[in-house]
Amino acid sequence: MSLLAYIEDTGVRRSLADQCGTTPGYLWQVAVNWRGRKAGIDLAKRIEKATDGAITRYDLRPDVFGAKPPRTKAKAA
């Protein structure tokens, strides 16, 4: 899921901004890459935590964190 799709609802955008310590406007700027805006490393981590991994740091900053690691299936005990 993209950050833009996640924050489409204004209420969700406000809530996520509050949880991440930023503004709804800045989240939108990051989501649309307005004037080259990107999430900083700490903000990317906070977004990942606040969205329970729906938006990952790898989605937001592959230039910093690299490609998203493949999901592995848990082995049954």
Image: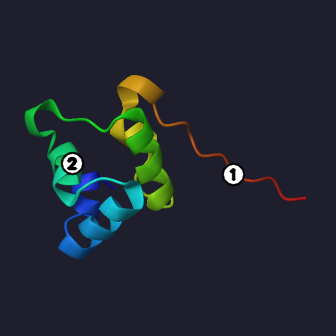
Q: Is residue 66 visible?
A: no
Compared to residue 63, the image places residue 50 above or below, namely below
Q: Nearer the viewer, residue 45 or 69?
A: 45
What numbered label is drawn on residue 31? Answer: 2
Nearer the camera: disc 1 or disc 2 = 2
Compared to residue 8, the image places residue 74 above or below, namely above
Q: Which quadrant is the N terminus positioned in?
A: bottom left
**On the rendered structure, is 12 left or right of 57?**
left
> In 3D space, how far apart are the residues under numbered discs 1 and 2 (Cα atoms)?
30 Å
Residue lying at the far left of the rendered structure: 35
Circle 2 packing at 10 Å, graded few (<14), some (14-19), many (20+), is many
Q: Which of marks 1 and 2 is nearer the N terminus?
A: 2
Query: Who's the residue at 19% across and 66% down the image?
Result: 8
**On the rendered structure, is 51 left or right of 11?**
right
Secondary structure at badge 1 equals loop
Residue indicated by mark 1:
73
**Whole-percent x, y for residue 51 in the image:** 44, 61
**Whole-percent x, y for residue 50 in the image:** 46, 60
Q: Looking at numbered disc 1 in the image, what kind of residue is underneath it?
A: Lys
Query: Who's the residue at 29% across and 62% down the image?
Result: 6
Q: Quadrant of residue 34?
A: top left
Circle 1 packing at 10 Å, graded few (<14), some (14-19), many (20+), is few
What numbered label is drawn on residue 22? Answer: none
Compared to residue 14, the image places residue 74 above or below, namely above
Q: Looking at numbered disc 2 in the image, what kind of residue is underneath it?
A: Ala
Colour convention: rainbow
**Whole-percent x, y for residue 67 in the image:** 45, 30
Q: Nearer the viewer, residue 65 or 68?
A: 65
Q: Which of 49 and 18 is in front in this view?
A: 18
Q: Which quadrant is the C terminus positioned in?
A: bottom right
Residue lying at the far bottom of the rendered structure: 11
**On the rendered structure, is 29 left or right of 55?**
left
